[in-house]
Image (cartoon, rainbow, N blue to C red):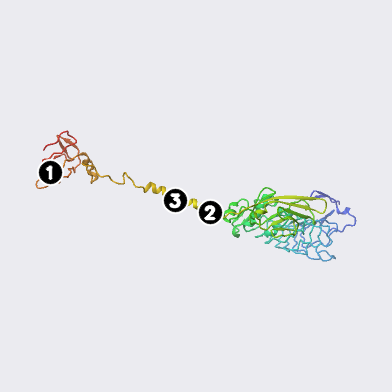
């Protein structure tokens, strides 16, 4: 039976067409250079591996570890005689760790799939021999720490590393910042249990501004835990006010304000790394930087203020105003090909961070003082009208009681000179008032509320009535 099928868009021919091919492992499917043993319930690797295999598919099995000598009669090493292998799929198994000996002989491996296992640890040198590795997927595992250290020149072709959906709480930010820009662009870290911190927030912000797919394709999934609380999760790109107000994260990225590509604003005293962007690939790239005031330099040169890394990046250790200018980078690949890159750096002086507070506080005090003075003017200024009573004019009665004020204001008395009734004297300045409410005047006499007429004279003296043009004589 001849086997034809498509794998990743490539037409595959049957292994039977190959002369002298090794026997296909029992229960697996061999077609051309592909060996598929997927979903077979395997607990160990096949005992045979055809030498021409470039793609080995072992996904959805029950593999818990890869032992040395898994292939009978082969020297130590799990995949001995497998230098031709380009793709290895170990996803959806039960692996709990990745040991250093697993992939020692896979020097030609380009793509490694380890996602959806139970991996809690990856030994630091597990990928050291994979110099041609381009893509590695370790997502949906149980990693609590960044799994390994990628040396700046050990994996020159590595462009995709998927570490998403694990349990990492912290990241080695310094090491990540020194990775080549191409790898940073393909470093997927979303859906972890990261603890919120400013340095991490600034790194993701810079990746966003550079348009890295690792961020732009998964904006909603980039989250962190506030103070490590699992119930308090915030999104890096939707809760910027939390980072900038609550955590007091600067809007600058590690002391720098990233402008459009090729321009950079840096605060004085801040350290910043300038990447030398290039599309050239290979292990033997040569970098050359030309700075405004320090001349040309190449890695690993370090003159105290500038530090060059093996990946071609240039670090300004402590930016000063005089470091402003255009930094020019040129890359050579050992042939006649070369590329150049320019970065225009502007260093800004730092202002006293307390100055805005002092200015605002002074303005507030001025406003409060002005308000107090206005209130004092409105309510405490001496009043010349109702606050102080004016002395009464001569002949004007002073009302001692509100209920008699009407009567005393109606009459204008003349001071009596004799007594009021038998044996009683009245002072010369005594005013005559009626204690009963006045109703009407009849025949020169006033009628009281009881209907009786009351005289309007005292001791033979007469007073002038407002109801009569002539004095009333008793």
Residue bearing the label numbered 1: 417
Q: Residue at x 16, y 35 (%)?
A: 442
Does residue 226 appear in this view? yes
* Picture quarter with the C terminus: top left
Q: Residues within 10 Å of mark 1 (few under 14, many from 20)?
A: some
| Residue located farthest toward the right when viewing the structure as drawn | 19
Instruction: Look at the numbered disc 3 and give the secondary structure of its residue.
Output: helix
Residue 395 vs 278, above or below: the answer is above
Q: Nearer the viewer, residue 16 or 361?
A: 361
Residue 373 as seen in the image, left or right of residue 60: left
Residue bearing the label numbered 3: 369
Instruction: Look at the numbered disc 1 and give the secondary structure of its residue.
Output: loop
Does residue 218 appear in this view? no
Sequence-earlier tag: 1 or 3: 3
Q: Cα distance, mark 2 to mark 1?
A: 82 Å
Residue bearing the label numbered 2: 357
Q: Which mark is residue 61?
A: none
Evaluate if marks 2 and 1 touch, with contact meaning CB atoms under 8 Å apart.
no
User: Residue 177's spot in the image, x, y percent?
Assistant: 69, 57
């Amino acid at each position: 039976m001849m086997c034809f099928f498509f794998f990743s868009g490539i037409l595959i021919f049957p292994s039977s067409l190959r002369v002298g091919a090794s026997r296909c492992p029992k229960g697996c499917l061999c077609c051309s250079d592909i060996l598929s043993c997927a979903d077979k319930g395997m607990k160990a690797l096949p005992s045979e591996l055809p030498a021409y295999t470039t793609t080995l598919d072992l996904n959805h099995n029950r593999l818990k570890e890869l032992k040395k000598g898994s292939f009978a009669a082969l020297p130590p090493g799990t995949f001995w005689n497998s230098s031709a292998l380009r793709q290895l799929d170990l996803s959806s198994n039960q692996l709990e760790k990745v040991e250093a000996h697993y992939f020692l002989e896979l020097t030609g491996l380009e793509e490694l799939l380890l996602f959806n296992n139970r991996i809690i640890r990856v030994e630091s040198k597990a990928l050291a021999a994979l110099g041609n590795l381009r893509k590695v997927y370790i997502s949906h595992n149980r990693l609590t720490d960044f799994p390994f250290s990628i040396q700046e020149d050990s994996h020159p072709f590595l462009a995709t590393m998927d570490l998403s959906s694990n349990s990492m709480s912290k990241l080695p930010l310094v090491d990540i910042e020194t990775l080549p820009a191409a790898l940073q662009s393909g470093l997927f870290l979303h859906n972890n249990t990261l603890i919120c911190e400013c340095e991490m927030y600034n790194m993701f912000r810079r990746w966003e501004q550079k348009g890295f797919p690792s961020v732009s394709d998964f904006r909603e999934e980039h989250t962190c835990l506030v103070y490590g609380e699992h119930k308090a999760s915030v999104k890096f790109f939707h809760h910027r006010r939390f980072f900038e107000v609550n955590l007091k994260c600067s809007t600058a990225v590690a002391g720098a304000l990233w402008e459009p590509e090729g321009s950079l604003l840096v605060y004085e005293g801040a350290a910043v790394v300038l990447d030398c962007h290039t599309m050239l690939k290979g292990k033997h790239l040569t970098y050359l930087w030309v700075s405004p005031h320090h001349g040309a330099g190449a890695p690993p040169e370090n003159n105290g203020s500038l530090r060059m890394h093996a990946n071609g990046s240039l670090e300004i250790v402590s930016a000063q105003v005089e470091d402003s200018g255009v930094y020019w980078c040129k890359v050579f690949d050992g042939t006649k090909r070369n590329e150049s890159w320019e970065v225009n750096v502007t260093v800004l002086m730092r202002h006293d961070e307390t100055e805005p507070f002092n200015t605002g506080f002074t303005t507030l005090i001025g406003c409060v003082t002005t308000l107090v003075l206005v209130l004092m003017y409105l309510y405490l200024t001496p009043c010349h009208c109702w606050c102080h009573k004016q002395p009464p004019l001569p002949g004007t009665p002073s009302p001692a009681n509100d209920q008699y004020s009407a009567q005393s204001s109606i009459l204008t008395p003349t001071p009596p000179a004799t007594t009021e009734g038998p044996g009683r004297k009245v002072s010369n300045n005594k005013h005559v008032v009626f204690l009963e409410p006045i109703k009407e005047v009849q025949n020169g006499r006033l009628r009281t509320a009881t209907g009786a007429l009351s005289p309007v004279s005292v001791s033979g003296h007469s007073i002038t009535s407002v109801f009569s043009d002539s004095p009333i004589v008793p």
